[in-house]
Image: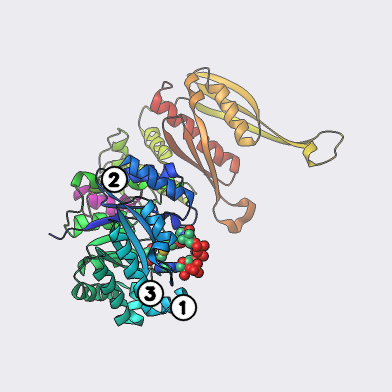
Amino acid sequence: MTEIQLYDTTLRDGAQREGISFSVADKLHIAQRLDDFGMHFIEGGWPGANPKDNEFFQQALKMGFKNASLVAFGSTRKAGIAAEDDVTLKALLESGAPVVTLVGKSSAPQVEKVLATTLEENIRMVTDSIEFLKAHGRRVFLDAEHFFDGYKADQAYALAVLKAAAAAGAECLVLCDTNGGALPGEIAEAVSAVVSAVNVPVGIHAHNDAELAVANSLAAVKAGAVQVQGTINGYGERCGNANLCSIIPALKLKFGLDVLPDNNLSDLTELSHFVSEVANLAPDPFLPYVGHSAFSHKAGLHVSGLARWEFAYQHIDPAAVGNKPRTLVSELSGKTNIVQRATEIGVELPARGKEVKALLQRVKDLESLGFQYENAEASFDLLVHRAATGYQPPFELIDFMVVIEKRRRAPMVSLAHEEMMSEAIVKVRVNGEVMHTAAEGNGPVNALDLALRKALLPSYPTLARVNLKDFKVRILEESTGTGSIVRVLIESTDGNEEWHTVGASSNLIEASWLALVDSLEYWLLKNGGQV
Ligand SMILES: CC(=O)SCCNC(=O)CCNC(=O)[C@H](O)C(C)(C)COP(=O)(O)OP(=O)(O)OC[C@H]1O[C@@H](n2cnc3c(N)ncnc32)[C@H](O)[C@@H]1OP(=O)(O)O
Ligand SMILES: CC(=O)C(=O)O
C-alpha cells in the first residue's frame, strides 16, 4: 500500500491568512495537538522572518514530538551570493529543525520577471541551497513554487529544476499550485509526467483560489504524489490552502489509505475546532466532515430516509471523523423530524398519531408568521411540552405594560442631558399566586426581564443564574417598513449550558417578550428551579 506523508503547514502558510496572528504559545499548542493527532510533518514557520518564529523553533525542539518531524521553511539562496553567506539558509540551520522545506522557483517566467535573474542561476540557487543544507545534516524537501503554471509555460525548464533538486539530494519534490488556479485534470497529467521523469517521491501543495485545492490534492495522490501539504480548516494565504480536514478523511475512508490510526481520525472535528479557537476565528459550520452542519438534516424526506437507513443522506458515518448527525425542525420538516426531536427531549410521540400532525402544522403555521425553530431548539421543545396533556407551566402571564419616556434634565446643554427611561409592569401567576411587579431598565426589554424576574425569583431563586447572552433582531419583509414583522432570537446561559429561543410579532416588544418567556420557562422546565 502507498505510504502517504501528511504535511501540515497551518503554522506557516496557515498563518498567512488575513486575520491570523499566532503567538508562540498558540503555535506550540497547535503543534502539540497536530503531533498527538498523528501528523507526519509539522512546518513551524520561517526562521529569521520574525522573532516569534525563531522562538517557536527553540521551544518546539525542547518540547519534542512523539510522531511528527519538525520542519523549517525558507527560500533558496539569493541570486549572486554563496549559500554559506545567505541569511535565510543560515537561519534555517540555526533553527535546529531536522527537516527543511526550501521554496524554489520552478517557473521560467517567475525566475525572469520576479527573481530578475537568469534561468541558469536559479537552477544553481536550488542546487547550492539543497547541497549546503544536506552537508549540514538536514533532510530537505523542495517546494517547487508555481510548478503547474511553470509546467504550462516552459515544461522543459520546470522539469530541469526538479531534476537538479533531485540530483542535489532533495528527498521530496513538492509541486505547488501557488496561484491556486489549476484544474484537477491538469494536476493529474503533470504529476504523472513528473512521477515518470524523476526517481524521487513527489508531493502536492495546492491553494484554493479556484476552490479546487482539495480536489487537486486528491487528483495528485491518484496520479502518484505521496506527500500532501495542507492546513487545518484550509487556512492560508488569500483563499486558503488545501484543507487537511477534508483531505485526510478522503484518503482514509474513500481511498482506503492507512494514513492515520482509525482512532485518531475520530479526533478530527475536535482538532478543527481547537485550531479555529486558537486562531480566534469562529468555526465554519459548513465545512465538510468537521462543520457543525456537516451532518445536519433539515428536509423532511431526508430525516425520514435516515430513520430507515443511516446512509440515506450521509456519505460517511459522522462518528468516523468525530462529528454527530443533527435533526433540524422547520417549515421543511415532516413528521419524522418532530418525532425524533421529541424523542431526544424524552417525549415519546406515536409516529403516525394526531399529536405529531398537530405539532408539525403548528411549526409550519408559526414559521409562516416569522418564527424560526431550527435556531431555537428550546422554543420548539416548549411547543412539544405545551402540547402535552396535563402540562403545568411554571408561570403564566396575565398581562404586562411597558412605558418608555424621554426625560430632559434641566438645564439642557447637550444630548447627554437627555435620558430614555423604560419601566415595565408585569402581572403573572406563579404557583397559584398572582405576582404584580414593576422594574425600570435601560431599555424596554431589560425592564420587562427585570420585572418578570422580580415576580419569579421568590419562587425560583436559582433563576438568578440565567443570563441573556445574545439578543438578535431580524426584520422580515422589510418592504413594509416600521410595520414589518420582526423576529427576535435570544441566546441564554446558566454558566453551564446555552439555549436559544425565538419570538416573532409585528411588535418588537411582544417578539422580545415571547423569546424571553420561552428562555426562562425552558430553564425552569429543565431544572425544576434547581441546579
Ligand atoms: C509561496 C509562499 O507562500 S512562500 C512563503 C512566503 N512567506 C513569507 O514571505 C513570509 C515571511 N517573509 C518575510 O518575513 C520576509 O519577506 C523575508 C524576511 C523572508 C524577506 O524580507 P526582505 O528581505 O525584506 O525581502 P522582501 O520580502 O521584500 O523580498 C523578497 C526577496 O526574496 C527574493 N526571493 C523570492 N523568492 C525567492 C526564492 N525562491 N529564492 C531566493 N530568493 C527569493 C526576492 O527576489 C527578494 O529579493 P531582494 O530582497 O534581493 O529583492
Ligand atoms: C510554497 C508555497 O507556499 C506555495 O508555493 O504556495
Q: Quadrant of ligand 2?
A: bottom left
Question: Image quadrant of residue 93?
Answer: bottom left
Indicate the secondary structure of the residue bearing disc 2: helix
Q: CA distance from mark 3 to mark 1?
A: 12 Å
Q: Please say whether residue 229 is one of the residues in the magenta stretch.
A: no
Q: Is residue 290 visible?
A: yes
For the residue pair 450 and 149, the one nearer the viewer reads as: 149
Question: Image quadrant of residue 425?
Answer: top right
Q: CA distance from mark 2 to mark 1?
A: 39 Å
Label 1 near label 2: C-beta < 8 Å?
no
Q: Amino acid at mark 1?
A: Lys
Q: Please say whether residue 302 is one of the residues in the magenta stretch.
A: yes
* Side of 443 relative to 242 (left or right): right
Which scheme is used to colour this image of the protein?
Answer: rainbow
For the residue pair 362 and 437, the one nearer the viewer reads as: 437
Which residue in the protein does label 1 denote?
Answer: 113
Indicate the secondary structure of the residue bearing disc 3: helix
Q: Quadrant of the N terminus?
A: bottom left
Around disc 2, counting alpha carbons within 10 Å, would you say few (fewer than 14), some (14 to 19), or many (20 or more)? many
Q: Earlier in the sequence, mark 2 or mark 3?
A: 2
For the point 37% across and 65% down, which residue is it?
Answer: 103
Around disc 1, counting alpha carbons within 10 Å, would you say few (fewer than 14), some (14 to 19), or many (20 or more)? few
Which residue in the protein does label 3 denote?
Answer: 122
Residue 444 on image: x %, y %: 64, 36
For the point 43% across and 29% down, which residue is it?
Answer: 523
Which residue in the protein does label 2 denote?
Answer: 35
Q: In the displayed structure, would residue 77 be above or below residue 232?
A: below
Q: Is mark 3 within 8 Å of ligand 1?
A: yes
For the point 43% across and 41% down, which residue is it?
Answer: 25
Q: Amino acid at mark 2?
A: Asp
